[in-house]
Image: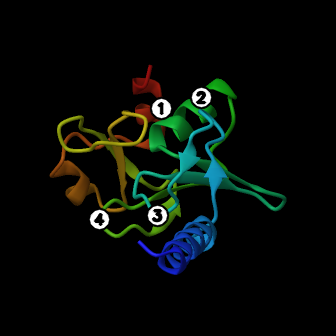
Amino acid sequence: MTPILSRFTAVLLVLFCVSWAFASEKFKCAECGMMVDVDSRFSAQIVDAKSTLHFCDIGDLLIYLKDKKRPATGAQVKDHPTGEWLDASAAVYVHAPKSFRTPMGWSVAAFRDREKAASHGSPLDLAAMTAALK
């Protein structure tokens, strides 16, 4: 490889890495500290007037709410079929390890529609799903 081609390749590699790093915002999970893939249908968040807490896994959100004895006000999860944000209190949840491989292994998915949730397992409301997690 010629020196010019070698330098050109190195510049392209650096530009690719820089553009990838800034392509999407990076957030740490408020529960476990892992980087959050905000595009994942298993990510969650708590939004209030001052800040947003991000979670890499719905299970991490539920554990956070449980451990901190915090109400679910402002908590949001993604509807598994559509990826749209919805209020965590309005969602139904399914724990299905054979169906859902989530970032932290909680295997919990959220649904807007109870019938769609039931096609994956037994749907639970927020309180029941939180109580079921250990």
Residues under numbered marks 1 and 2 in contact, where contact means CB atoms less than 8 Å apart: yes
Question: What SS does tag 3 mark?
Answer: loop
**Amino acid type, callout 3:** Asp
Q: In front: mark 3 or mark 1?
A: 3
User: Which numbered disc covers residue 86?
Assistant: none
**In this figure, which residue is indicated by the disc labeled 4?**
81
**In this figure, which residue is indicated by the disc labeled 2?**
66
How far apart marks 3 and 1 lie (CA) works out to 23 Å
**Amino acid type, callout 2:** Lys
Sequence-wise, the earlier of marks 4 and 2 is: 2
**In this figure, which residue is indicated by the disc labeled 3?**
39
Q: In front: mark 4 or mark 1?
A: 4
**Amino acid type, callout 4:** Pro
Question: What SS does tag 1 mark?
Answer: helix
Q: Which class describes the residues within 10 Å of circle 2: few (<14), some (14-19), or many (20+)? A: some
**In this figure, which residue is indicated by the disc labeled 1?**
130
Q: In front: mark 4 or mark 2?
A: 4
Residues under numbered marks 4 and 2 in contact, where contact means CB atoms less than 8 Å apart: no
Question: What SS does tag 2 mark?
Answer: helix
Q: Where in the figure is residue 105, as x and y percent of width and height?
A: 36, 33
Please give the name of the residue rendered at 43% of the width and 35% of the height, measured from the top-left corner: 104
Please give the name of the residue rendered at 50% of the width and 72% of the height, measured from the top-left corner: 6
Sequence-wise, the earlier of marks 1 and 2 is: 2
Apparent side of residue 128 relative to residue 120 in the rendered image (left or right): right
